[in-house]
Amino acid sequence: MSESIHMTATVPLRPAHDRPGPAPAPARPGRRRRDLPRGPLHPATWAPTALVVLVLAAGWSAVAAEHPYILPRLSDVGLALADRPEVFLSNAWSTLSIALVGVACGAGVAFALALVMSEVPVVRRALMPLAVVLNVTPVVALAPGLVVAFGFGMAPKVIVTAIITFFPVLINVTTGLRAVPEPVLHVFQTLHASRAEVLWRLRIPYGLPYTLAALRVTMPLSIVGAVVAEFVAAGSNGGLGTLISTSASAARLDSVYAAIACLATLGVLMLALVSAVERRALFWHESQRTHASRPRRSHPAQRTEEPPR
Amino acid sequence: MTHAPDDLGIRIRGLTKTYDGGDPARPALESVDLDVGPRRFVSLIGPSGCGKSTLLRVIAGLEDHDTGEVSLFGSSPRALCAAKGVGLVPQTPALLPWQTVRRNIGLPRRVNRRAGTGGEDPDELLRAVGLSDVAHRYPHELSGGQRQRVAIARAFGLGPRLLLMDEPFSALDEFTREALRLQLLGLWQRRATTVVFVTHSVREAVTLSDEVVVMSARPGRVHEVVRVDLPRPRDAAVVTGPHMHAMEDRVRASLQSAWETGAAPDDLVTL
């Protein structure tokens, strides 16, 4: 788990407008066909993935036919979902609620702490080493202690999820708050802007791509945190982690993999949510420029150099 | 004789600046004396490392100096900034990418409201720089020249007493530079702000300025102040006339002399 956290210090691209140089060249009429942006429904977009899924499904079915105690048949997994949808839905909601509360707490505290650390260097020097230690400590090892302290309810699971999501947000937001280009800071300094104005009008907006990049990683990670917590502290709340534990002990591989499919779906939905927020909030950022369907984007021909009048 | 604050302009005496970790024997700026009258357009030009951008940043209050005195209209740089009396146009446009052109131009009115929220109407400024039709676009939807025009309009927006420009046209093509120079002159002549303009281009310095301050490097010093006695307004006829070329040659000769003054032995090539 800690390995995945180490991979989260995502550094978004700098806005193109801060680079000196002429505007991007307008689109040429002779652009090659394969360079044109394609929608998600275009076969060239989904066909390669569909092909890989078919190959994997065929391999899975071959193994499942010979060794049903290693992999369940895909039809059995589908039947498990179809027979008891309410079981999977209620457990998915339980896991999702832990993940959302956990990520809200972890990311919220990390964001607030990053703001304080960016303004008060002594706080950064005091707390950053502790945050790093917390990051490298296996959270699974903390869970039993949290169960003893807080019981089998929601609290220990939320705390485990919050700890897992805390560090990536802290690191990314801390980096993002320092990502204001120097010329912009100089303009604000000559206007004698207060620290609060610099924070509110510059540091937080320039840090937004970094904050959302952190959420892109931590939102799906919160599902991992919730499931790990449910493994360790299975209690009255249920959840897909608990369902997987109990199904595995009863050798119900179809239910195990049905629950895993639900978890994957939750992760994809969370990722889609963050992507949608990114597209809306970061329309100005270079990372979003490749989206062909952005409504605010002007036609490339309008971006050609035009002499001042 | 006592002067009203507006008559004082910029007064720099004995300015010395050494960067942390720099060679104390070779300060970035040494014993710089400079006077810029009010409502004058002055360019700083010189070889790389002569300290022209450092001098601009000291005037803007962005950097401290070691010794000497910097007075802007009778105030310190920071006091004039606190009163929103300084406009800055950096090398890159430094626009806020999530705000429209119009919001970017109105930005100085919204920052440091304690010092006032007045200034020129953003729509009037947009018309003056010919960008009314892109008022609601975002910076990434503009060309490089348009972005720099927004940055200039933003700096003029508060009607600053002092406008500091640090190679604002260096990233643009020659055709756009030429057009922007004339547009800048048009804006300045109607507003009568004191301008300090850093450039590497002799032609740009002569076209725009009343005086060209030629600086030498190692250490950074004022080598010579060349007075540009071309008539104003500097329209196309003036900037293509023979007197313009003579002035360019005059500044170029001074620049050559400044370069030889500050050149390191390795820089000199024996022919």
Image: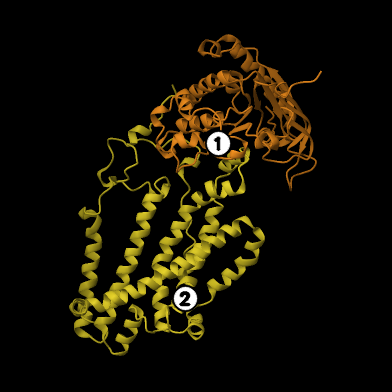
Chain colours: A yellow, B orange
Residue at image position (49%, 28%) is: B121
Which quadrant would the N terminus of chain B be assigned to in this image? top right
Res. A258 visible in picture: no
Residue at image position (66%, 37%) is: B82
Q: Secondary structure at mark 1?
A: helix
Which quarter of the figure has residue B257?
top right
Residue at image position (42%, 34%) is: B142
On the image, the x and y values in percent for residue A62 come to 20, 79
Label 1 resides on the chain identified as B
Amino acid on which the number 1 mark rests in the picture: Pro
Q: What residue would you read off at disc 1? A: B108
Q: Residue furthest right?
A: B1
On the image, the x and y values in percent for residue B17 come to 75, 39
Amino acid on which the number 2 mark rests in the picture: Val
Crowding at mark 2 (Cα within 10 Å: few <14, some 14-19, many 20+): many
- The Cα–Cα distance between marks 2 and 1, rounded to whole angstroms, is 46 Å
The numbered disc on residue A160 is: 2
Which quarter of the figure has residue A228?
bottom left
